[in-house]
Image (cartoon, rainbow, N blue to C red):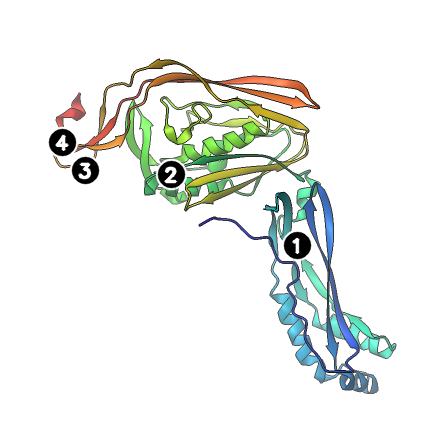
Amino acid sequence: MTRSLALLPLLTLALAGGAQGQTFKLVFKATEASIRKGEVREQAIVKSWPLPAAGVKASKKYNKVSSTFTPTLNRIEKALSARKPRPAVFRNVGGSWVAQGQTGWVFDRDATKKNLLRAIRSGKKTAQVAYKRIEPARSVKVLAARGVRWHVASGSSSYAGSPAFREKNILVGASKLDNFFIAPGHEFNFNEEIGQIDASTGFVKGFVISDGTLTKEDGGGICQVSTTIFRALYQAGLPITERHEHSHRVKYYDPVGFEATVYAPAKNLRMKNDTGAHLFIQATWNAAADTLRFDVFGANTGRQVNISRPVITNFKPPAKPSYTPDKSVALGGRRLLDTPAQGMTSVITRTIKVGGKVVSKDTLKSVYEPWGAVYGVNPKDKRLKR
């Protein structure tokens, strides 16, 4: 199923019905901000609850709020308290990106009753519902103040065919990069953002490339995450300060060369935010389709980024097979863990234009060594000693 949040409903209060002649109303007014096409827009939220004429008459006569209003006040409190603050996120609505969050509301019964009695005394027909707003930690206005108003770029990849351990580590890693900011002038540091990779942080053991074969370590598959966010930031036009390709071609990361491997602390992915505003990163994944995607939001830089298809040369035949211990395999048997791959060199060219003029051009060169099939064999198998 697709992991995504629907746009948050603005109008959450139920309008209470009333009998004929109930002309006095308690009125609730609020606004909720959104970002559409780079602009902050305020949407008005107005709801009203009619009050019984007999209660209004009694309140005026005895100079206190009638107890007949209590059920209505209870309904208002229930409606307002049900609305909780939710952080602002971007969602694609009909082809346009919209940022929307939700403020929480806390009903102020005492202040509302004072407003009500004051209005009745003065002969008015309405009184304001009093409440307190609770802003989410990341509001629409926070996004706007940081310059995050536009969809800048996206990057996606497929992890179809991945074993369960790999899927688990991909989703754990992606969740750690969901909904975070990269400050202007700041260098995105993948290993730093992901943090410790072990069981205590949600990762499980899986195969990683080590010493020319596959071995089991915590976080196997994390390079699907580094590759996908690299694609998004590269498409956004960010300069690379550190990036490494895998030692051999891995088909999970095709197109060939459009990838980034990590292995803390030796290998990292680092890219600098040179857009002049904050960047905001969102991750989404589709467990049914086995796809991962990162979207980048920020200022409208006017950049037009073109990334070429890879130009592949220097093909070399695959290497000889290698073997790794696997307790599930009987002595003398073997289990295919990875297929062979040719050696090759890939070159990808990125061209950045602003106002139709080329302002930057760079190449992404990846050299892949030949790779042999990897088999799991019994830990006592003599082939492990070769």
Tell me the crowding category of disc 2: few under 14, some 14 to 19, or many 20 or more residues within 10 angstroms, Cα based. Answer: few
**Is residue 191 visible in the rendered structure shown here?**
no
On the rendered image, what quadrant is the C terminus found in?
Answer: top left
Circle 3 residue: 327
- Image position, residue 354 (x, y; %): 68, 23
Q: Nearer the viewer, mark 4 or mark 2?
A: 2
Q: Is residue 83 left or right of residue 66?
A: left
Query: Mark number for residue 28?
Result: none
Circle 2 residue: 160
Q: Is residue 124 left or right of residue 98?
A: right
Q: CA distance from mark 4 to mark 1?
A: 62 Å
Lower sequence index among marks 1 and 2: 1
Q: CA distance from mark 1 to mark 3?
A: 54 Å
Circle 4 residue: 380
Please report contact status of discs 4 and 1: CB closer than 8 Å, yes or no.
Answer: no
Please report contact status of discs 3 and 4: CB closer than 8 Å, yes or no.
Answer: no
